[in-house]
Image (spheres, grey):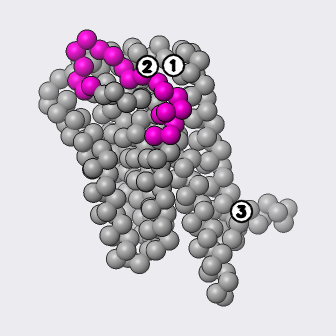
Amino acid sequence: MSFVEARLSPGGEFGLHLTVGMALLLASGLVFHELAEAVMGQEAITVLDVQVAHWFNAHAVEPLTSLMVGVSAMHSVAGMLLLFCLLAGYLWRQQARYWLLALAFAVPGGMVLNVALKFFFQRARPVFEDPLVTLTTYSFPSGHTTAATCFYGLLVSYLVMARPAWSVRVGTVAFCLTMVLLVAFSRVYLGAHYLSDVLAAMAESVAWLAVCITAISTLRRRREGKTV
């Protein structure tokens, strides 16, 4: 019982934050593993992937297509660099140095991890007779969705912790979740990725965020504990 109580203590160095972090890591890691196995094994989800991809390609209309192109461009490498710098500057002004450190690991690290996974799985992009976008890099998992999930996931984690007002917390969660889903939808809509690519990217990113935020939180608690 003492071990369980210590793991659920919100103030302990290895308490509730570590328990929640490990739970998120295991759950999202399992989801990613199952998706990767299904995709590589050419299971039923790959049939659904093709059906969804071709449906969107056949039903693409303006101005939705232009909107999705804009959403994707905003979360490209250049767009994410701008968003990263804006959030980093805000955290610096708020003197949230541990959150700034978490940001420095979460977003660039998540993007590097995604590139490594792409080369490991080497899944080809969707193919159409009349594509909306043409890309030659690998498809699984989605890089745009990974970057968005890492960025907005860290943003919502910080604001939920730093802002006590429930209206701000709920609004932040709704906004960040909407942005992640919008980026994921834009990649499927434009035919840049399959549905399973964006789902795997979200699972991968949640796992990576759990590692980054939990590690930085543990570091902060350990250092603060030594100064008491």
Q: Disc 2 marks which residue?
A: 49
Secondary structure of the residue carrying tag 3 is loop
Q: Residues within 10 Å of mark 3 (few under 14, many from 20)?
A: some
Residue at point 71%, 66% (across, down):
14
59 in relation to 16, above or below: above
In magenta, the rendered stretch is 115-134
**Residue placed farthest to the right in the image?**
1
Secondary structure of the residue carrying tag 2 is helix
How much space separates mark 1 and mark 2, taking CA atoms?
6 Å
Look at label 3 and name its amino acid: Leu
Q: Residues within 10 Å of mark 1 (few under 14, many from 20)?
A: some
Look at label 2 and name its amino acid: Asp
Look at label 1 and name its amino acid: Ile
Q: Is residue 88 magenta?
A: no
Q: Which mark is residue 45?
A: 1
Numbered disc total:
3
172 in relation to 33, above or below: below
> In this orientation, which residue lies closer to the viewer: 228 or 82?
82
